[in-house]
Image (cartoon, rainbow, N blue to C red):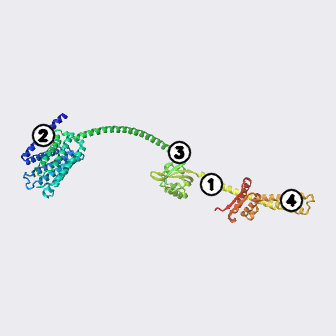
Amino acid sequence: MKPRLVPAFLSDAVIILAALIGLYFSSLYSFLLFHSLVEMISVVISGTIFVLAWNSRKIVDHPFFVVLGVSYLFVGFLDLLHTLAYAGMGVFPQAGANLPTQLWIAARFLNSLSLFIAIGFIKRKVHYPSVYLAYTIAVAAFLITLFLCNLFPDCYLEGSGLTPFKKIGEYIISAIFVLTVPLLLKRRKMFDPGVLRLLLWALILTALSEFAFTFYLGVYDLSNMIGHYFKVIAYYLIYKALIETGFVRPYNLLFRDLKHSEEELRRVNEQLDARVQQRTAQLIDANRALQAEILERKRVETGLAEAERNYSRLLENSLTGIYINLEGRIVFANQRFAEIYGYSKEEIGGIENLKLVHPEDRELIEERRLRRLRGEELPSEYDSRGLTRDGRTIWVSRRNTLIDYRGKPAILGNIVETTQRKQMEESLQESRKELRLLSAQLLTAQENERKWIAQELHDSIGQTLAAVKFSLERKISQMDIQKAPSGMLLENVLSLIQNGIDETRTIMMNLRPSILDDLGILATINWFCREFQRIYSHLQIHRDIRVEEKDIPHHLKIVIYRILQEGMNNVSKHSRGTEVFLSLEKTR
């Protein structure tokens, strides 16, 4: 390829050199001819660019080609007006040199901005109608401002030359071309290397051309001529980059994106193949995992089905009745529940729950059901009466809990028939009553017997011993004990009689103290404590009596005394303590 590029470069140099020489000789003959040839070359190249872009719009919808193609149509149009308005052409005889300079500066602004926009928006999607309409509005607005409103700033004044607006405008245009260069380099991957070099040189020469147009004082000055030389060379490079390349090697320009697209497509296909393989492997793994999950789910479902069958058998064979009460009706019941109430399993399904409850207990059962549904704390177990199918009253023990049944709150119940147990409990209660009655009668008889024995001891034996004691004491007082041999013997007998009297009193106190019947339990307690402390002097008794005699029932007085008696005896026999605390009070 390189041996072919060198001759092509030389041929291009020869063509440019020949054109420049020809233009130079034409300038010697007539500068107007020179200017007209230069501008017409620019107009022809501009029109050719538009024709190529327009005719290939269905093949190449590239943003750079669209913007540049449409822009050169309007740039060429303004260059044509500039050529016709040039001094000496006679088309606008009254305009002078200002009008062509104004048209020139407008065309250059349009050209520089178009190249900058075309390269800057190369990655964005644009359409011919929108671009064409935008350029039409912009050029029309400029022409109206220039010809009708006369508002466009002057660019050339006779006698003083170029205006500051013209010079500053050229500097701005040159700056735009210079700024387009790094932008083009940033997008260099979007262009063929040969096309890129041609566009870079075209931008540089155009910037130099605009810079040269800032020095001339007259339209026929040398700087004006040099600027036109640079313009011809720049347009030729544009021609080489777009026109010749578009016809001779169209794939370098028109289908540059296709090459990138093909490479991108190849890269995407490779990535896609890798992703497909990766995804396929993932799908295979997922499929295996899914199969394993399906097998596991089937195993779990089989286990659940077996567990459900076992649970159903457990419910049906349960010795207790199990039911679900939903909105006051039995929606589920096992066989035992139906048997307790004398129904078949089919008959009891859907029956009203209160129909199975004794009338006297229905209010209680319904109140507890409603409170349990409201979430209140209630005893989970309680007994109630029920009604069988034949109207027989039975006792059942209930155990209820709140559950969610098919999205609604319900009562899960467990019942056991306790009729026989209740009958046995009632019989036991009667037996206990009879036993308590017999015990009370026995205790009463025992206390009466003790009372009689104590009375007999006091009235007969006690009085007899006391009389004997008094007689002996009188007899001894009449005798001279020192001289009578029987004096000492009588004193011993008297001591024995006194011991008998004390022992009789102790027996009477243990059997039933007479003070209990004469003065009451409170006086008896005080007397007993004094006597007990007299016998067991090492014990200190503390009493706290907070009850009155009238508050103590008569039948409890002997019971209290026996408790006190038994407790004190245990203290004296088994305790090593030195203090006893006695408390008696009424609790209710």
Q: Who comes first in sequence, dot 1 or dot 4?
A: 1
Q: Is residue 345 visible?
A: yes
2 or 1: mark nearer the eye: 2
Q: Amino acid at mark 2?
A: Ile
In 3D space, how far apart are the residues under numbered discs 4 and 3 (Cα atoms)?
Answer: 87 Å
In 3D space, how far apart are the residues under numbered discs 2 and 3 (Cα atoms)?
Answer: 114 Å
Q: Is residue 435 above or below residue 282?
A: below
In this view, the residue in front, 440 or 357, is: 440
Q: Quadrant of the N terminus?
A: top left
Label 2 with label 3: CB-CB less than 8 Å: no
Can you tell which mark lies on residue 15? 2
Q: Amino acid at mark 1?
A: Glu
Q: Amino acid at mark 3?
A: Asn
Q: Amino acid at mark 4?
A: Leu
2 or 3: mark nearer the eye: 2
Label 1 with label 3: CB-CB less than 8 Å: no
Q: Who comes first in sequence, dot 4 or dot 3?
A: 3
Query: Mark 1 = which residue?
Result: 426
In this view, the residue in front, 480 or 271, is: 271
* Mark 1 Cα shell of 10 Å, populated few (<14), some (14-19), many (≥20): few
Query: Mark 3 = which residue?
Result: 317
In 3D space, how far apart are the residues under numbered discs 1 and 4 (Cα atoms)?
Answer: 63 Å
Q: Who comes first in sequence, dot 1 or dot 3?
A: 3
Q: Is residue 129 visible?
A: no
Q: Which secondary structure, mark 3? A: loop
In 3D space, how far apart are the residues under numbered discs 2 and 1 (Cα atoms)?
Answer: 136 Å
Query: Mark 4 = which residue?
Result: 494
